[in-house]
Amino acid sequence: MSAGDVQSAPPAADQPGGGRRFWTRYQSFLLAVLLSVTICNYIDRGILPLLQELIKADLNLRDSDLGLLSGPFFASFYALSAIPMARLAERVNRVRLLAGIMTLWSGLTALCGMASNLASLIAFRLGVGFAEGGCVPITHSLLSDNFPLRQRGLAMAVLSAAQPAAAVITPIIGATIATIWGWRAAFVTMGLCGILLAVPVLFLREPRDKPSATGKLLPSRSPLMTDVRWLFANKAYRWLFIAGAFMGMGNGGVGVFLISYMMRAHERTLVEAGSVLGLLGAMGLLGTLVGGYLADRLSGERGRSYPLVCAVGALAAGVLYLTAFAQSAWLPVFGLLLMAGIATDLKNGPNFAAVQNIAPPRMRATAAGVYMLGPTLIGFSVGPPLSGFLSDAFAARLFASPEGSYDTLCRASTVADQVQQMCSAASAQGLTYALLIATLTYFAAAFAYWMCSRTFAPHAENA
């Protein structure tokens, strides 16, 4: 497919047959490119939790340090950049902007492999978070401008499949590279691959009218706070935002420490735990596609199925994770985690499609950017550090040695074998208790999604 072929295709949403069942050639190409961008986004986000046990040992970190790295230190910059990135995306050429920020976050991911201490790793991760904040507003608004309402749920599910797809790719490639060449090489490799993947983005076209695609700033259609007030005046959007915050707490609080849990509580190696995480990603991919299909198929006139599918997935995820972390044997834990992988990702497509369907076309990037404050600034800023602090606190309480405290003995450079066994047992049990508490947020998310469904209706311009 040549650049000319790609750029000559009109967006489906502008065509009389915009409600067709099958995608056009350009729609398929656009979705493939946006999918690769979003996979890269999730890989660069997820590579740190995968490698954190190696990083913890190398840089002598605590669980609370790990929680802060994947939580506030990353999520705050990610979330706070989403809104200005979204506003910028509504005024300049989104294709060029997307290619630029993808190159930036990938380069900073590679630099994470050069970090020599906690401070330098934090600095690079802050940069990654800032650049990645523009990914969702730009990709979601580009997709929505090219897919009409009745195609949007499945299309958004395919795009959202990037998260479980990255969960498959990251442990397979990342764990293998880290095992052979070390965790630093894994960061560098992933970052350089992302820079190469930014090239196909330039073959997309900006579907807005020509003055919008010149790269020059255009007058904002309305002030930011006017748009924000309009969004939060919508009850369905408010409940979606609340649900996203609770899902972010759960996915962050559980997901960031899942590799650590398998390695500590069930004595899996990094490669084994990474393989399980890959299987969870495959299950999540299935859940994402099924969720998008069901939401579109059952949408009806008001589209209430979009938040309802999310509610079912969140409720099932809470039950499955809670049951899994209460088990001591590995096989039932393994099976329950696989089922939880499906349930957790049922919401991926319907959730983001619901956000886009509520907002008018001119506000799509802003709606996505504001929404991302929920799962990132609130969810991921609270979930991972809370799990980390709880894990450390439970471990310290469970550790019983007359020779000293958990923090003193277990972080020493040399530890006797007997003390090391006590440290490992306390660390594993402490993390398990922390994860049991983290799963409760899924039940809160399920309730918020259900409340959203009661008032949900697409904006008139999306009908």
Image: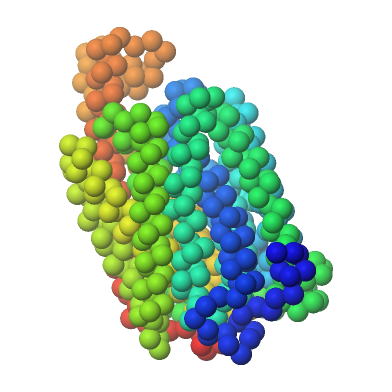
Q: Quadrant of residue 238?
A: bottom left
- In the rendering, at what x and y percent does residue 82 appear? 59, 59
Relative to residue 337, is residue 296 drawn left or right?
A: right
Residue drawn at point x = 22 percent, y = 56 percent: 319
Q: Quadrant of residue 171?
A: top left
Residue drawn at point x = 24 percent, y = 12 percent: 418
One can see residue 250 in this view: no
Furthest residue toward front? 1
- In the rendering, at what x and y percent does residue 3 appear? 76, 65
Taking 43 as reference, is 247 above or below it?
Answer: below
Relative to residue 281, is residue 198 drawn left or right?
A: right
- In the rendering, at what x and y percent does residue 348 appear? 43, 63
One can see residue 7 in this view: yes
Residue drawn at point x = 61 percent, y = 45 percent: 128
- Which quadrant of the figure contains the N terminus? bottom right
Residue drawn at point x = 42 percent, y = 29 percent: 53
